Image: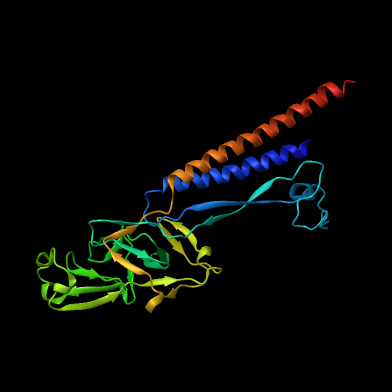
Amino acid sequence: MLRGWYTGASGMAAQQVRLDTIANNLANVDTDGYKRDVAVSKAFAQLLLRRVNDDGVYLHPLGSGDMAPMIGKLGTGVESNEIFTELEQGALKATESDFDVALDGSGWLCVDTPYGERYTRNGSFILGKEGYLETKDGYPVLGESGPIYVKANNFQIDKDGNVWVNQDYLDDPEALVGREQNDWANPMLLDTLKIVDFEIERYLAKQGSSMWKATDTSGPARLMRGEDRPTVHQGFTEAANVNVVSEMVRMIEVNRAYEANQKTIQSQDSALGKLINDVVKL
């Protein structure tokens, strides 16, 4: 009967991880560039039972070591395997800011931080006090030549990520309000947004504040060029790829699964109590 306790307890622990993951997704539904997490669970065959008499020798259960063992009608529960991040494209939403940038397609924008280069899909940028294009946390956005220095109303970013400025209006930014890039008399290429990809991007590590960092498994950042680069949209941001309705449905499923495991433990406890108090007396 104690095995039933372990089975129910492991199920409750796994559902708690799922619930925390769903809650985090819902909390970030309005965070630009956020990618939803999914808690992945797996059965751990004989994990607890194997450790009870662990002498360093692994005995395979019937079938193979990857199969759940046959112990009456009881399994040995589940465990949380990993938190998997879905990197699918979020919807693009228009803003009224020329400093906002969205990527349509795979790729990552580069940001310079005190901890090294970091990567993001959150293109909600601002103009810093020193004139650099920055994240809302104050980290400079990187071009292929370094931080990007611009002036309000005096720069355009095309679909290839090229940053253009107008030399004729550098001293009078207000003269460019409402004008298109092709109306500029003397456009100058300032820099190109640094956009990178990775060999296995699913193994990028989340750092908070919509930042990611490369890992040994993901591989180093690779500069994207030519047709491989995503389309850049100025005046847009990428919304989180979180569907509120789907997340709420998953939350209901998790709550029901948690309650079912809880009732399993209560039933096992009741049966054990009856065994001790009634059967032993006989």
Does 73 sit left or right of 200 as displayed? right
Residue 270: x, y in percent? Answer: 74, 27
Q: Residue at x 37, y 55 (%)?
A: 239
Q: Residue at x 40, y 53 (%)?
A: 240
Where does residue 260 sit, x and y in percent of width and height?
64, 35
Name the residue located 59 percent from the left edge and 43 percent from the top edge. Answer: 15
The answer to whether 154 is drawn above or below residue 10 in the figure is below
Q: Nearer the viewer, residue 120 or 43?
A: 43
Q: Name the image quarter holding the C terminus.
A: top right
Query: Measured from the top left, where is residue 64 in percent x and y?
Result: 79, 58
Q: Is residue 225 visible?
A: no
Residue 223, quarter of the rendered image: bottom left
Residue located at (56% from left, 46% from top): 18
Quadrant assignment for the N terminus: top right
Give the percent coordinates (x, y) of residue 17.
57, 46
Closer to the camera in the image, 107 or 133: 107
- Return the residue nearer the eye: 39 or 213: 39
Relative to 228, residue 233 above or below: above
